[in-house]
Image (spheres, helix red, strand yellow):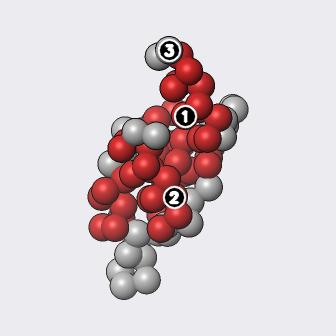
Amino acid sequence: MTDKNEIWIEAQKKYHLSDIHIQMARELGMNPKKFGGLANHKLEKWKSPLPDFIEDLYHNRFKKRKPLYCENKAIIIVLKANQGK
């Protein structure tokens, strides 16, 4: 796996995000290293939880609630690795 994929996998585990939330964040061009500043809704009550925040941004940008199709990240990584061979 590449470093980019490992960062996304770590962010998914650390912030308890689903595959759909990770896909939406990637399509939005979000930086997983910056999720810590966005995910402090317990300290700053005016912020929404990170999964809700990602869904709201995705809806505002693409005018739909969720992607039509979500692929599992493990499958995507294997397919991309095989394409380079």
Q: Earlier in the sequence, mark 3 or mark 1?
A: 1
Question: Which one is in front in this view, the residue at disc 3 or the one at disc 1?
Answer: 3
Q: Residue at x 59, y 25 (%)?
A: 79
Mark 3, other Cα within 10 Å: few <14 / some 14–19 / many ≥20: few
Q: Are marks 3 and 2 in contact (CB under 8 Å)?
A: no
- Expressed as whole percent of the image width and height from the top left, the position of residue 19 reads 61, 49
Image check: 21 left or right of 37? Answer: right
Residue type for callout 1: Ile
Q: Residue at x 46, y 40 (%)?
A: 1
Image vertical order of residue 37 relative to residue 66, above or below: below
Image vertical order of residue 65 relative to residue 43, above or below: above
Q: Earlier in the sequence, mark 3 or mark 2?
A: 2
Q: For this rendering, which residue is in front, 23 or 14?
A: 14
Q: Residue at x 51, y 26 (%)?
A: 81
Label disc, if present, on residue 77 of the rendered structure: 1
Residue sticking out furthest to the front: 85
- Label 3: which residue? 85
Q: Quadrant of residue 5?
A: top left
Label disc, if present, on residue 12 of the rendered structure: 2
Q: Earlier in the sequence, mark 2 or mark 1?
A: 2
Q: For this rendering, which residue is in front, 78 or 32?
A: 78
Residue type for callout 3: Lys
- Expressed as whole percent of the image width and height from the top left, the position of residue 85 reads 50, 14
Residue type for callout 2: Gln
Mark 2, other Cα within 10 Å: few <14 / some 14–19 / many ≥20: some
